[in-house]
Image (cartoon, grey):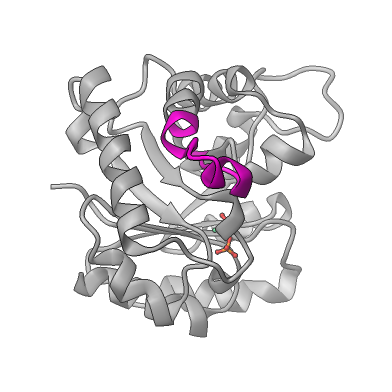
């Protein structure tokens, strides 16, 4: 049985006052669903004291050194974090991260005993030119290390064109990509059937139930709708009921 995961990516949002939202999310009875918030690094140590999982949004491939402004997986773990995102499309775009770089960062996360949520997804032009499944395969093969297991890795399928846009793929499109990811995982890893695969991209309370009913969707990676407890808790509730 794969444990369901509701993960929130706060991106570069949230000052100290946002801790009240995190506390309200953590206080909610998640009914067996794993709840994860990836806040800005400034809030990580404080948030790690709450009864839910917290994670970084990225980590460096090295454990320490002259990398101004970066954070290592060990430093994330030192705050109490148990997860980190790797390969979010905003990192791939804004910081020109390649699959090889993401693979190295993910390997560093494993070394620090963090579970990596490896993000993959196609752009709109790739979708429109029927390249979605090829892109997904290439990113999975390149970004996910050979040492990945269902325990140290979660895959997040996030179509780039659905992130923060209010646009969501059809249920059939989500089902097709998740089935494809599952097939590639089971081909490559002995425990491939046990990896959790999340959908991400404009998930909100109003579409969560429908998305969580799609086969092979084990939860969601949520941006905007994870910032406020009033928006995120109904998504956790929908996942628990799915
Ligand atoms: C994300 O940033 O990972 C994301 C899915 O954002 P949103 O839910 O706002 O589309």
- The answer to which image quadrant residue 33 occupies is bottom left
Ligand 1 position by quadrant: bottom right
Which residue does the image show at 50% across and 81% down from the upper left?
231
Which residue does the image show at 60% across and 55% down from the upper left?
161
Please tell me whether residue 205 is drawn above or below residue 113 in the rendered image: below
Q: Is residue 29 visible?
A: no
- The answer to which image quadrant residue 104 occupies is top right
Please tell me whether residue 139 is drawn above or below residue 34 in the rendered image: above
Estimate the x, y position of residue 135 in percent, counting from the top left.
50, 31
Farthest residue toward the bottom? 230
**Left or right of 194 on screen, residue 115:** right
Q: Is residue 16 visible?
A: yes
Estimate the x, y position of residue 187 in percent, counting from the top left.
22, 21
Q: Is residue 134 magenta?
A: yes
Please tell me whether residue 197 is drawn above or below residue 111 in the rendered image: below
Estimate the x, y position of residue 177 in percent, counting from the top left.
35, 44
Which residue does the image show at 58% across and 23% down from the upper left?
99
Q: Is residue 219 magenta?
A: no
Please tell me whether residue 73 is drawn above or below residue 94 in the rendered image: above
Name the quarter where the C terminus is drawn.
Answer: bottom left
Which residue does the image show at 73% across and 64% down from the upper left?
13
Estimate the x, y position of residue 100 in percent, counting from the top left.
59, 17
Which range of residues does the magenta coloring cover? 118-136
- The answer to which image quadrant residue 10 occupies is bottom right
């Amino acid at each position: 049985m794969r444990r369901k995961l509701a993960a929130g990516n706060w991106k570069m949002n949230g000052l100290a006052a946002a801790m009240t939202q995190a506390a309200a999310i953590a206080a909610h009875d998640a009914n067996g669903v794993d709840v994860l918030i990836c806040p800005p690094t400034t809030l990580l140590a404080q948030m790690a004291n709450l009864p839910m999982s917290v994670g970084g949004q990225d980590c460096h491939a090295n454990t320490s050194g002259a990398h101004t402004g970066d954070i290592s997986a060990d430093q994330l773990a030192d705050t109490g974090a148990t997860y980190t995102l790797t390969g979010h499309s905003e990192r791939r775009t804004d910081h020109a991260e390649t699959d090889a770089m993401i693979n190295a960062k993910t390997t560093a996360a494993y070394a620090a005993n963090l579970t990596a949520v490896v993000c993959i997804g196609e752009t709109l032009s790739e979708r429109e030119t029927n390249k979605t499944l090829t892109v997904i395969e290439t990113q999975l093969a390149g970004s996910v290390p050979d040492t990945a297991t269902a325990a140290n890795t979660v895959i997040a399928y996030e179509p780039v064109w659905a992130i923060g846009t209010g646009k969501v793929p059809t249920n059939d499109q989500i089902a097709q990509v998740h089935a494809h990811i599952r097939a590639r995982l089971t081909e490559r890893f002995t425990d491939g059937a046990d990896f959790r695969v999340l959908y991400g991209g404009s998930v909100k309370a109003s579409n969560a139930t429908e998305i969580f009913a799609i086969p092979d969707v084990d939860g969601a990676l949520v941006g905007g709708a994870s910032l406020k407890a009033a928006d995120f808790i109904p998504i956790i509730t929908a996942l628990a009921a799915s």
